Amino acid sequence: MTDEPGVMMKIEELIASVKNSVEAKKVYAEPYEKNGITVIAAASVSGGTGGGSGKDEKGQEGEGGGFGIAAKPTGAFVINGDDVRWVPAVDVNRLIATMGAVAVAAIFVAARLLKSRR
């Protein structure tokens, strides 16, 4: 932030804060170990930023910006001795939506087949 009253964070500062937010530490969790098994969770992290500045018809200046970050689990590395395996995270909502779409498509295909046989 700047020392001037009423002045918002500069765009460059905003971009720097986004860069600090999207880093490897945000993708891989700290290893968790129990009973000789180590688990390292992983996530897909993405972000974006935008901003701008300008003047209005009265000559008043302004600027603004923002950023967003989204993260979702992708899976985990499970380490047991010398054995390392990847265990993908299951997105149950996406799975249900996909199964629903396949079921609706199957109903339409079945209806067309029955109609064409008549």
Image (cartoon, rainbow, N blue to C red):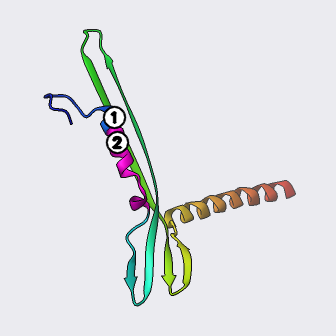
Callouts 2 and 1 close, C-beta under 8 Å: yes
Q: Secondary structure at mark 2?
A: helix
Q: Secondary structure at mark 1?
A: helix
Can see residue 112? yes
Q: Which residues are the magenta region?
A: 14-27
Local crowd at mark 1 within 10 Å, few (<14), some, or many (≥20)?
A: few
- Residue at 44% over, 61% down: 27
Q: Residue furthest right?
A: 117
Q: Position of residue 97 (x, y in %)?
A: 55, 60
- In this rendered view, identify the residue nearer to me: 50 or 102: 50
Q: Quadrant of the C terminus?
A: bottom right
Can see residue 118? no
Dividing the picture into quarters, in which one does residue 110 lie?
bottom right
Q: Quadrant of the N terminus?
A: top left
Q: Which mark is residue 16?
A: 2
Residue beneath disc 1: 12
